[in-house]
Image (cartoon, grey):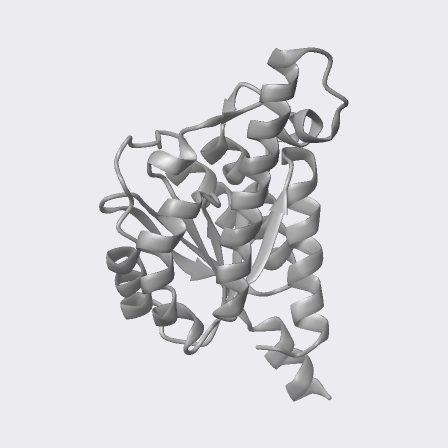
Amino acid sequence: MVRTYRAERNQAVLVLLDNGRVMAGQVAEVPRVEHAMDALMCLTTVATRLGDRCGLVAFDRTVRTVIPARAARDQTGRVADALSDLEPVLAESDYRGAFAHALARFRRRSLIVLFTDLVEQAVGESLLPALPLLVRHHLVVVAAVRDPDVVRWATAAPDGPAEAYRATAATMALAERERAAGRLRALGAVVVDEPPGRLAPRLADTYLDVKAGGRL
């Protein structure tokens, strides 16, 4: 029982933060990457307090920062310091390069949480070809920030041509996100696509479900 308890406490969580163009778009007047930072700080806090090691790789067209995985109580502060000066880069992210860099440093099977956005073109052209590098040996969660305004526009009854056009565009945008999520799930990833206020608790629940199920 002691050995099992120690093994459960000594699991690894690796957070990959996309800092590229798709994360520069704003949700509630805040860049998506900042909402992602809030959620990853919450996840880091929960994981380290439960005795798991948590690390970070932030990247865009190049790797910007790496925080080695640790279970220390001050790990959340280290992550916060590393993210304090990070600004989204208006360039396409190099997923393959970032994943290869991360795997070279973090070899043990881990829960990998990738914060990015579900832009269908970017997912299809860049993320999907690189994702097999991760899912081959790791449990992968793709976390995205869904815009609640787009959901509201898609579901509200339109009042006039302008609102009808906006509703159509919002419906198409949500359909594109779902297609992108479906393609990621087909490769074995878990997809969490939630508005800012719900992303952090959903990720924490996903992490706890992974631990409870002994999936690492």
Q: Residue at x 39, y 37 (%)?
A: 22
Question: Residue 199 appears at what percent x and percent y?
Answer: 64, 43
The quadrant in which the N terminus is found is bottom right
Question: Residue 127 appears at what percent x and percent y?
Answer: 36, 56
- Residue furthest front in the image: 161
Q: Residue at x 66, y 30 (%)?
A: 148
Q: Residue at x 26, y 50 (%)?
A: 94
Q: Is residue 81 left or right of residue 7?
A: left
- Residue furthest right in the image: 157
- Is residue 127 among what the camera can see? yes
- Is residue 38 among what the camera can see? no
Q: Residue at x 60, y 12 (%)?
A: 162
Q: Is residue 57 left or right of residue 100?
A: right
Question: Residue 74 appears at what percent x and percent y?
Answer: 52, 48
Query: Looking at the picture, does residue 81 appear above or below residue 186?
Result: above
Is residue 47 or residue 180 the one in the foreground? 180
The quadrant in which the C terminus is found is bottom right
Is residue 214 or residue 181 the one in the foreground? 181
Query: Looking at the picture, does residue 36 appear above or below residue 110?
Result: above
Question: Residue 206 appears at what percent x and percent y?
Answer: 67, 60
Quarter assignment of residue 194: top right
Count of marks, rendered view: 0
Is residue 156 or residue 57 the one in the foreground? 156
